[in-house]
Structure formats: C-alpha cells, structure tokens
Amino acid sequence: MKAKIKVTLKKGVLDPQGKAIEGALSHLGFAGVEHVRQGKYFEIDVAESDRSKAMTEVKAMCEKLIANTVIENYDIELA
Amino acid sequence: MKSAVVVFPGINRETDMMRALEATTGNKPVSVWHTDAVLPKVDLVVVPGGFSYGDYLRCGAIAARSPIMKDIRAKAQKGLKVLGVCNGFQIVAEAGLLPGALVRNAHLHFVCREVKLAVENNSTFFTNRLKKGAVISCPVAHGEGNYICDEETLKALEGEGRVVFRYTQGTNPNGAMNDIAGIVNKAGNVIGMMPHPENMIEPLHGKTDCRPLFESLLAA
C-alpha cells in the first residue's frame, strides 16, 4: 500500500520560501498570484495491506518524524 | 565538571566546542558518537552546531531521533544538564527537550555575523557569572534560526523568565519571535541557543565576551 503524505505549514507560521516564490512568479509576469505557501510531499510504500492498520502506522510516522506538529500539519492519503 | 560533546554526521563545530570546554573548565570533554546507546557519566552534555544529516527533512530532525538522543532525553528528564548550540538547539527542540521550533530566517539569507545578546536570565548554569541585563557580543551562523512557538508557550517563556538570551534591539538576525536567541526549559537543566559562544572566548577570536558563559559551568 502506498501512503501519499502532504506536509504543510500551519496557518500563521511565516513561510519566507513561499513569499520568495510569490515574488518570483510576479517577476515572471503572473499578475494574478495572491498568495503562495510551500509544503512537502512524501510517498511511503508500506507492507501492511489492511487499510486501517496502515493508516495507524503512517499516522504514527507523521507524528514521530515526517512532520513537526509544532509548526506543521499533515494529510495522509492511502492508495 | 565533566562534559560530553555529541557528534552526528554533518556536525562541524564539535572541535570548537570541545576546545572551549577544555580551555574554560580545565577538563577535556568526552566525544560521544550518535550511534552510542549510553552516555558516559558526565555533568553536562553539549549538542554542538553544524549541519547534521545535511539538514534533510528539517534541521535537526534526523539527529533528534538517533540512538544517543534516547539516553540524553531520559537523563535530561532526571536533571542532566544539556546545552544545544545552533544546530544543537534545533536538535534539542526537535527531540522535544525544549518547546517551539527553529524555522527559516525571515529574510531567507544565511547569516554569519556578530550580534549583541542581552542576558535576560542570569540564574542558569550557563549564565550565572554574568549580570542580568548584561550585553555581550556573540557570533551567529545559521539559515534557520527563526524561533517560533505558540502564543501560550511564548507567554510561559516570558512569564517564567525562560528567555535566557535576547538579541538586542536592531540585531535580530533571523526574525525570531520577541528577539529570542536562547531559552531554558522549565526545570532549568536544558538550554538551547542559536549563537555560537564557543567562538568568542579567546583573544584570537577578537573578543572574549562569551568566556563567562563557560566559566558559569564551574559554579553550576
């Protein structure tokens, strides 16, 4: 089973990289860009075939390592 | 005063730190490798600066989960003194020994320069030789030293005098909340700071402003 994980900065956490990308997009002439937030994406293949067990396991991975829950949120999709 | 300095792959300030500890306390620190399971018997463990694991995932994230950190965490909970400097601060915060996180500098640039630090709390094991409010020079060298925490944590840090070092007005190099440069945990035995005091202790460094910090270890 494959877990697709999106890690994003929590609301209110400053994202200077997103800001820099926002600036670069406007330099390129994309006038309509209002706001950019940058995040991370992970794909983890797990041996577990039971959906709920896999979810529990991947959630624990996110809590323990993949995300820093002080500043980040995570979102898991199993496929 | 016996001390240990932890070495992770990618750390590069361990030699400076060991030299500073030996020059100021008279005892040569023990070097501990990250895969060791147990710390030797020491009074202080220092997590030095550098770029552990190339800052992969998040600064300090991988190092914070290494075998030696398990023992450091357990012993810190029983009162072992821990000092995290720069990447060491990031590692100690990622390990949950200090609240909050260090994120990308607000202006995105790596900063390598001298800043002024106000000693806000002089009752810690690393500041007891200085006067409260004393201002010292100290170098910084980091890309992710922007201290951030939730409102409740910030209130507790400020209310309980747990901000140990603050960048003086106009010298905040990274956008850290409330100009925070270093903090201490509630129990008083874990300190994390972004600046590098080990690089301002002898005349060859240009200034010796940070020497009293290390000399504080002798009284602690």
Image (cartoon, grey):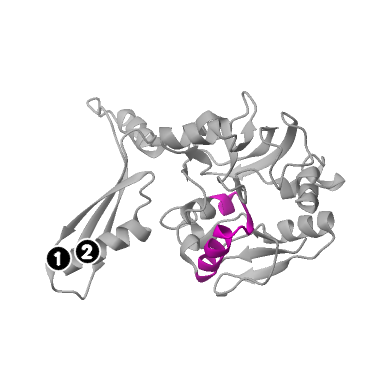
Q: Is residue B118 left or right of residue A61?
A: right
Q: CA distance from mark 1 to mark 2?
A: 6 Å
Residue occupied by mark 1: A52
Residue occupied by mark 2: A56
On-image quarter of the C terminus of chain A: bottom left
Residue B199 image position (x, y, % from top left): 74, 48
Residue B89 image position (x, y, % from top left): 56, 50
Highlighted range, magenta:
B67-89
Subunit of mark 2? Answer: A
Q: Main secondary structure of the magenta part?
A: helix
Q: Using the rendered image of the protein, determine whether residue B106 is visible from the camera's viewpoint.
A: no
Amino acid at dot 1: Ser
**Residue B173, above or below B190:** above
Question: Closest to the observer: B199 or B100?
Answer: B100
How many other residues sit within 10 Å of disc 2, few (<14), some (14-19) or many (≥20)?
few
Q: Is residue A62 left or right of residue B119?
A: left
Q: Which mark is residue A63?
A: none
Q: Are callouts 1 and 2 both on one chain? A: yes
Q: Quadrant of residue B170?
A: top right
Is residue B201 a member of the stretch shown in magenta?
A: no
